[in-house]
Image (cartoon, rainbow, N blue to C red):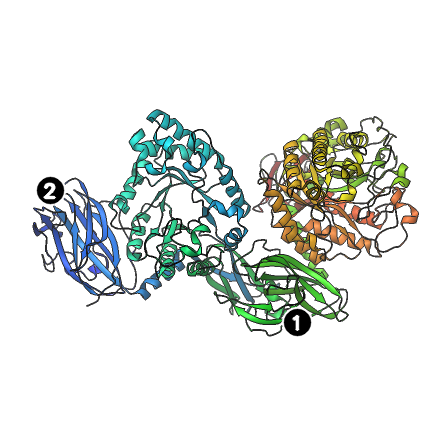
Amino acid sequence: SLIEASSYNHSASIKCLANPLVPQYGGGLVVNSQFDKGLEGWHTFGSGKISTRTSALGNQFIVASDRHQASDSFSQWLYLEEGLIYTFSAWVRISEGKETVVVALRDSSKPRMVIGSVIAQSECWSMVKGGITVNVSTTFELYFESNNTRIELWVDNVSLQPFTKSQWRDQQTKSVEKVRKRKLRLHVFDKQGEKLQGAKIIIEQKKPHFPIGCAVAATILNNIDYQNWFTSRGFAATTFDNEMKWYFTEQSQGHENYTIPDAMVAFFKQHGVSVRGHCIYWADGKYNLAWVKALPPRELLNAAIRRIGSVMSRYAGEVIAWDVVNENVHFHFFEERLGQNASAMFYKIAAALDQQATMFLNEYNTSECPEDMDVIPSKYIQRLEQIRSFPGNENMVIALGLQGHFDSNPNLPYIRACLDILGETKMPIWFTEFDIGRGPNQAEYLEEVMREAYSHPAVQGIILWPGNVPRGCKSECLVEFQGDPPQNCSKMCLTDSNFKNLPTGDVVDKLLKEWTRERLDGDTDDDGVYEHQVFYGHHLVTISDPRCGIEASSYDHSTSIKCLADPLVPQYQGGLVVNPQFDRGLEGWNMFGNGKVYVRKSDLENQFIVAYDRCQASDSFLQWVNLNEGLLYTFSAWVQISEGKGIVAAVLRDSSNSRTVIGSVVAQSGCWSMVKGGITANVSIRYELYFESNNTGTELWADSVSLQPFTNTQWRAQQTENIEKVRKRKLRVHVTDKEGNKLQRARITLEQKIAQFPIGCAVAATILNHTNYLWSKEEKKVQGLFFDDADDDNDEDLNMQDEQGDDQTPPQSPNPRTPASTPSSSSSSSNSGGAPMKMRNSNYGRDLDDRKSTSGYAFHIGSAIFSWSSKKQQIVALSTCEAEYIAAAACTEMKWYYTEQNHGQENYTVPDAMLAFFRQHGVCVRGHCVHWAHEKFNPDWAKALSPSELWDASLKRVGSVMSRYAGQVIAWDVMNENMHYQFFEERLGRQNASAMFYNVAKALDPKATLFLNEYNTLENPNDMDVTPSRYIQRLEEIRSYSGNEEMVNALGLQAHFDNYPNLPYVRASLDILGETKMPIWLTEFDIGRGPNQAGYLEEVMREAYSHPAVQGIILWPGNIPHGCRSECLKEFTGDPPRNCSKMCLTDSNFKNLPNGDVVDRLMKEWNGENLKGSTDENGVYEHQVFHGQHLLTILNPCTGQKVTRQLEVTKDEKSEPLDLWLSI
């Protein structure tokens, strides 16, 4: 009768024990499994003799002796059923030495089937574990083998246990719940601390803990469809097929070429995908090049050492693992040539060269082929122990790489048994090259083995191996065949050559969704508690108060710039949008324009809306939404088109047919792209929300649509919350007296001296000649400056204006007066002991090469005597990117048309003087700009040049300006407005012209950050040339140019707003651009004229300052003082009159206007914080303080003693408090 068990026993032993353990499952089907009844159920197999024997402790076991053939042993007949899964175990021993013992099954018509094996030895018992599935119900003979016929073969505690497929799957499910998940318990309270019943809970998995990856070929570098397919699936890791192997990188001795692996590493680093280093060496001689095999031992050793040093020093820190000597259990090329410890020595060297990465053995057939005796689990462990026994390797973690190249009928119970055995090493286990042989059930077996691997406690990662893509998956490769594929065809294709999923690809997508993109919905119970098992990893938890309807107080900054296989859930559960996920068909949605709409279901059961048979760009689908005046609405959706790539815009239209774009994205076929935006309603009215795409030949798809309202109060609270989080850190001061006692009521004063976040202001050349060039009526901290090119003496010569209204033409005869030498003003400060210390400007506003930020107080500037206290940081406070961004400045007097008005006649007099002036006072400068992509802002003589002459002149220009000011500026706008305009690409006939200039610029000034600099990305949603996704696209184009891959390109957003800025769209755009992880600055920030100019200036400054992605702001007050004379200050809307500034902070006498008052107030709020307080009963004072330099003063209330300290508060990624202990 069938002995059933529902639970699987993962236990195994890799130790040789004095006594065998009891049989698993009571022996299962095996009769007399412990030999308590002598030989009952057992008989002789082959020749030889069998008997039972009793140990000194009374344990009985079976013995085969007088053996002549390997198979001479003992056997038992067992009836096995098709469709059942059998797991096997036994304990074996031999009478002398060490030998491999094999367990096999045989029926009357088939050759033997190995179901398990182990290296057995004398003096102790070894456990063999394995398994089998059969494709026919019949009687099989179970027996044992050992090639050494001189030894006796001993066996005890034999077990063969059947499971049904449903039991097996249930075991996998239970194991996943146990080893891949943890119970999460959320306790939800309202603002009054009361338990909140019925709160809506959404938990979205964002990043899994368990990595599932896919191997790739070099063809991914030049195949956009390949890239999109890979990046949209959420693979966490990859392995290169061949591109890191020795035979690829050094095809002839001494001639290394890492061009392709360098590009591949850069690509995956850009997309956040981990890379496995495969491989340093290959132990199979046939995969080593002829020149390697021809070397004598000493030269081979030298070449091998050079190889390991070359590849590992190049990619150390860039890869997570190294296959050090590939397939070293099967093959021993280096041992045969260099000695038995060659590979062990290589592992030791590898561990020293890259201490962060994990070293792997990597083998095939261990889990795939029980018949391959070279790589059975105990042989694998034996090789592992040999390597770790080499001096210095004893504590090395060596992961077990199981290639996993399965045939068309994988043996699931044998796989699980192997993993049980190998797991006893406590080393990490990965399936490193996982594929399934061709056959009618390939997709089914792929799912079965992936579930087996994922559910096993010992496995820590899976890399799929789809082979040579796309060539290996062309149509002729997809015909049915058994066994090995035809030449140049992949064994397992996930897609066809056009990257359309095959059934195997559908399996992978389904499992990735199940394991890596889980979404849970639920409600809190009567105690305000929601609990559920969730996967290990990163999750986004959304909690909604059921009493507040659709309202939300927290803003969701999350976005995606990756194209995903499946859309994420709608933000804010859709907010105002009815049926946002189309779970209820077309409810709430209608056709917009012509064409047709319907709801389609994906293979993974996801429903989305489709517009087809479109004739106009706006033919799509719509929903009516009611917007209320004064509310701010944030929008998001996921879109896809049926073929190619194209811009998809989300639009609102009112009853007068006035159209407003609220967001757009470059969408594509094959994956989903997120569009994010927003709008502020200036009237309460009903709008049509619909979508547009100019390509009417494609279907338009949308899903997970959301439109969420916020009040102005909520919006400001979100800004304040962000500032507390990203611009501040908790400071905790612990004060004791001289005896070490906690000092209560000690008086604390904390003065902010230098802010970490730079806020700067553009200046004109007139600053060199104007005595009263002041920014405001009071002293003002200046962290960075941006020079513009207006000169008060040459106003009638200004005949060029750009679209933003700032004057662009340089003075015809630059002849500024050099600033008069100025006496050093002194100021007093307190040192650590409280004594006054004299300070001079020459000690503070010094060389900028250290990139320390500076804060200055300007009084009178120009030819007259002035006073300036410019204090440089004593310690560089690192921002989230680079120290260079602590202060900000730029210089438009550096423009080409300014410095070289006539061909070959350069004049740097003005920018030299300005640089010298601000360098003298420790103010950082931004270099604006090297080139301008707009034709009309290039010198006339340059526009008349031939392409070759223009190329020479433009390169000379880069070299001239950058070599002159390298090390003196913190940033360069290399190619200004290169998304709107392409002057150099068009004239030079080189599509990579701008990218080449960035490459040259980086070489000329490696310390400076290189900016893209554009207008309308934040300001105008209707400008489709510079949407956030277009900006990112251009950034990627520049960084994809050879040599630019690792370049940090900052994102310059000019921010020339009109008189009604769209705050939700600004925030959404910053969310999107922030996903690039590149620095973002507002570089030319101003607000259009209008009655609320000062109010909008404050709103946008707060929006920028509070956003986590923004790292600096440069204000743009235009042509000073001429542009702010009395006739320019009259009311007007839109662009200012000629030679008038769009946004004045002061009048022409430098008296503050309302805009200047706003700037003063915000600078004081953010850059001039002064705190006072007292220590509590524990002698502690704590407060949230801005990042930057502070002066801390502590007064002992008992003794009157005072201590002063300079304090640097930096950002802490873990949000840990900054603790300071002081005694007074």
The crowding category of the residue bearing disc 1, from other C-alpha atoms within 10 Å (few below 14, some 14 to 19, many at least 20), is some
Q: Nearer the viewer, mark 2 or mark 1?
A: 1
Let me know if residue 948 appears in the view. Answer: yes
CA separation in Å, label 2 and label 1: 88 Å
From the viewer's perspective, tell me whether residue 243 is left or right of residue 1006: left
Toward which corner of the image does residue 762 lie, by quadrant?
Answer: top right
Find residue 1068 and report its horizontal and vertical position in percent: 66, 56
Q: Which residue is mark 2?
A: 150
Name the amino acid type tagged 2.
Answer: Arg
Name the amino acid type tagged 1.
Answer: Asn
The front one of 147 and 1103 is: 147
Query: As drawn, which residue projects farthest toward the bottom?
Result: 587
At x 40%, y 60%, the residue is: 177
Tell me the SS state at disc 1: loop
The front one of 73 and 458 is: 73
Find residue 815 and report its horizontal and vertical position in percent: 86, 30
Find residue 1018 and report its horizontal and vertical position in percent: 71, 53
Tell me the SS state at disc 2: loop
From the viewer's perspective, tell me whether residue 4 is left or right of residue 470: left
Residues at discs 2 and 1 in contact (Cβ within 8 Å): no
Q: Classify 87 as above or below 1157.
A: below
Image quarter where the N terminus lies is: bottom left
Toward which corner of the image does residue 854 lie, by quadrant?
Answer: top right
The front one of 739 and 120 is: 120
Q: Which residue is mark 1?
A: 594
* Mark 2 / mark 1, whichever is N-terminal: 2
| Residue 427 circle label | none
Query: As drawn, which residue projects farthest toward the right?
Result: 1127
